[in-house]
Image (cartoon, rainbow, N blue to C red):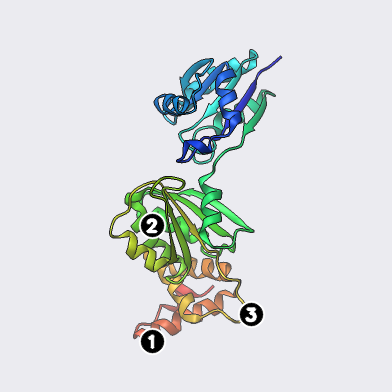
Amino acid sequence: MTGTLVLAGTPIGDTRDAPPRLVAELAEADVVAAEDTRRLRRLAQALDVRPGGRVVSYFEGNEAARTPELVEALAGGARVLLVTDAGMPSVSDPGFRLVAAAVERGIKVTAVPGPSAVLTALALSGLPVDRFCFEGFLPRKAGERLGRLREVAAERRTLVYFEAPHRLADTLAAMAEVFGADRRGAVCRELTKTYEEVRRGPLEELAAWAAEGVRGEITVVVEGAAEPGPGAADPAELARRVAVREEAGERRKEAIAAVAQEAGLPKREVFDAVVAAKNAAGTEPREGKGKG
């Protein structure tokens, strides 16, 4: 008989949030694969439990090499417990590669549900949570970050991101540029910890606040795009969105086509908005660049 792979959620801040089943799995697993073995030892000490099996590291740097070893242990009947530093494995953390390999071999995979920064931030944000999508971490490079944000500029569902504190101000500024300065957001910092803080407001205001410096683990929640009504598109906003794409390196024709698709409008209507904006500024776009 093959073994079982157990994905266990771990506390995102307060160790008292650890589910009782996590304690039992730590004691009973044949192998415990941990993102950081030192943090695992501290968690086990706080929970007053001693891992009963072999403890190995399983992190981004060795994930590819260690997965076959763990799969072979599973195939041999071992119960393997996978834990990351916080939250559920595979969610912007190591785990997907091992799960996929185990599923391919027909090995049972189960989970011990636990705390989630994504769901906790959504619940605290004050934004609609009936429909949402998780976008993980944005790219570090400014151009790639803008490109990723433009891909979801028209997304109606609430958006959830993880972000490093030293990149938060730039990320919020980019969001304000692409989504609009007045789009609502919430920055959730140090969730469940002593200095937990949730900042809510327009993206432009949040960016200004973050520019002063922010510390801790960050989850950002952003309101989805409003549902456009027939003929309700603001020409100035359409022109602004085209300009944002052009500044990021897109040709005007492609930028107009993308904005038209996002807004559900004919390309001609977006082109006319760009022409009107250029005329108002005293510069007219070249005809051949914008027609489509």
Q: Amino acid at mark 1?
A: Ala
For this orientation, the residue located farthest to the right is 1
Q: Amino acid at mark 3?
A: Pro
* Residue at 53%, 64% in the rendered image: 223
Report whether residue 249 is seen: no
Rendered view: 98 above or below 78: below
Circle 2 SS class: helix
- Residue 229, horizontal then vertical, whole percent: 62, 78
Residue corresponding to mark 1: 280
| Viewport quadrant of the C terminus | bottom right
Q: Amino acid at mark 2?
A: Thr
Report whether residue 6 is seen: yes
User: Foreground mark, 2 or 3?
Assistant: 2
Mark 2 / mark 3, whichever is N-terminal = 2
Residue corresponding to mark 2: 171
Residue neighbourhood size for the residue with mark 2, other residues' Cα within 10 Å, grouped as few (<14), some (14–19), many (≥20) = many
Image disc number at residue 230: 3
Rendered view: 181 above or below 274: above
**Separation of residues labelled 3 and 1 (CA atoms):** 25 Å
| Viewport quadrant of the N terminus | top right
